[in-house]
Amino acid sequence: MSGREALGDAAWLANGEAGQLLTLLDSDGEEARIVGGAVRNALLRLPVNEIDIATTALPNEVVRRVEAAGWKAVPTGIEHGTVTVLIAGKPFEVTTLRRDVETYGRKAKVVFGRDWVADAERRDFTINALSLSADGKLHDHVGGLADLVARRVRFIGDPEQRIAEDYLRILRFFRFYAWYGEAAPDPAGLHACIRARAGIETLSRERIRTELLKLLVAPHAAPTLALMTETGLLGDVLGGVALLASFENVVKAEVASGFEADAVRRLGALGVWVKEDGERLARRLRLSNADAERLSALEGWWRVSPAAGEKFAHALLYRLGPQHFGDQVLLAWSRSSTGAADPAWRALAKLAQTWRVPGFPLKAADFIARGVAAGPALGAAMRAAEEAWIAADFPADRTAIEAIADHAAREAKTTH
C-alpha cells in the first residue's frame, strides 16, 4: 500500500503550502519528506496540525530556495539544521538530515548527513519516525507502522540509553501513551522510565509543564496518570498527592456539559484541594500568570452546589466571570456524590450560556447627583450599592435600582 492509500484523503500533502514546499525541496539532487507527527496522525485519521519536513538539503540551501520562491525563512535553529518556513503566515519546520554525535539533555552536537535511516534512528519513538515522500511512498525504518497499528509506544533502540540522552523522554513516553497507546505499555520502556525517574528533577520546569499539560488533555489521560501514580512518577512531577478520582470525574463533567478538554482545569482537578496546592503547582510548573490565577480562583469550590440556589449561582458567575465560574463548578461537580448525568449540575455548569450576566447599572454620577462627595464616600456608596444589587439578584427594574442608589447614598453621607 502506498503512503497516499494509507493516508486516505490527505489533501494537505497533495495540495496547498505543504505540497508546494515539499516539491521545492525534493528536487535538483535533494530529497525531502514529511516526517513525524503529521504522518503518524494522518495514518490514524487524526487532525494534522503541524507539518514538519526533513531534507537532505543543507540549511543555507533551504533558505536560498525558500527565499527564491518568495517565502520567508526564519533560522530558528539553524545550528542544528532547522529553518522555519512561513508561507501565507503558516509555519513549517524544515530540518536537514542529521545524526547526534554527542547528546546532553535537550542539546546535542550534530553533523548533517544524507542517511534517512540514521535520521529515523535518532528520533525517540518508532511511531514518530515514519516519513512520507512527495510521491506518496511511506518509509518505515524502525518498525513504526506495526507499532502504530498495535497502538504501541516503543522507544527506538535501547530505552535506557535514549532516556539518558534526554530525561524529558520519560514524560514523553507517558504523554504519547496517553494519546496513542492501547493495552499494556511497552514493558521495556516502562521499566526504563521507572529506573531513570530521578532524572526528572534535572529538567527545567517549563519543559515538564509543557509535557504534562499536553498529557492532561489526551484521550487516555486518566489511566495513564494512574499508571504514573503507581510507579511513583506523578508525585515527583506534581510535588504532591494526585487526586485521580477528581481528575477522572472532571473529564466526565466536561463531556456531560459540552466543555472542551482544558489542561489547566484538569490540572486543578488533579492537584488542587486548597489554595496552597494551586500556589505550589504554579511555582513548580512555572505556570503563566493567567494559568496560576485560574488555579487560585478554584478556592471556595467546596461551597458550590446546585442546592445553593439560583441567586448564589448568579452572584458567583457575576463575581468570577465565565471561565473561573466554569472551573469552580466542574471541580465541585467532580468531587460531589452525584454522577456526570446529574441534570442540576449540568444546568449549573452551563449557566454562563443560559443567563446573560448584567452590567452594574449605576455610575459615579448617580451618587454625586445624590450629594455624595467624590473620594472615599463615593467609593463606599458604589460598593455598597453593587453588593445590594447583587443580593437582590440583579434587578433590572429602574425603581428598584433607584431605591438601592438612594439607600447607599444616605449611608455613605452618614458614615463619611
Image (tube, rainbow, N blue to C red):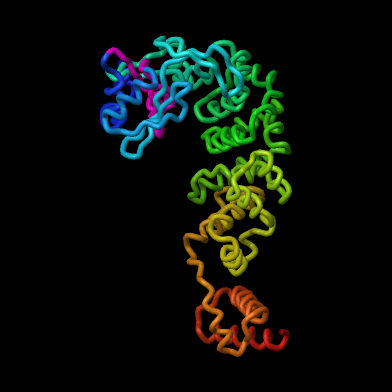
Task: Determine the residue positioned at 37% across, 15% down.
Answer: 56
Q: Is residue 84 left or right of residue 413?
A: left
- Asked whether 123 or 236 is in front, the reply is 123
- Where residue 23 appears, as percent x and y from the top left, is 27, 23
Asked if the magenta segment contains residue 377, the reply would be: no
- Where residue 206 appears, as percent x and y from the top left, is 60, 36
- Where residue 412 appears, as percent x and y from the top left, is 68, 84
Where are the magenta residues, as a range? 29-57
Task: Determine the residue positioned at 59% across, 77% down.
Answer: 389
- Where residue 314 appears, as percent x and y from the top left, is 57, 67
Q: Does residue 130 appear anywhere in the picture? A: yes
Exactly how many numbered labels are in the figure? Answer: 0
Q: Is residue 371 left or right of residue 61?
A: right
- Asked whether 327 or 113 is in front, the reply is 113
Q: Is residue 103 left or right of residue 77?
A: right
Above or below — where is 274 with respect to 190? below
- Asked whether 245 or 11 is in front, the reply is 11
Task: Determine the residue positioned at 61% across, 43% down.
Answer: 287
Above or below — where is 387 with respect to 89? below
Above or below — where is 100 with respect to 381? above
Q: Does residue 9 appear anywhere in the picture? A: no
Tell me which corner region of the image, top left, top right, bottom left or bottom right, holds residue 386: bottom right
Tell me which corner region of the image, top left, top right, bottom left or bottom right, holds residue 392: bottom right
Asked if the magenta segment contains residue 37, the reply would be: yes
Quadrant of the rendering where the C terminus is positioned: bottom right
Quadrant of the rendering where the N terminus is positioned: top left
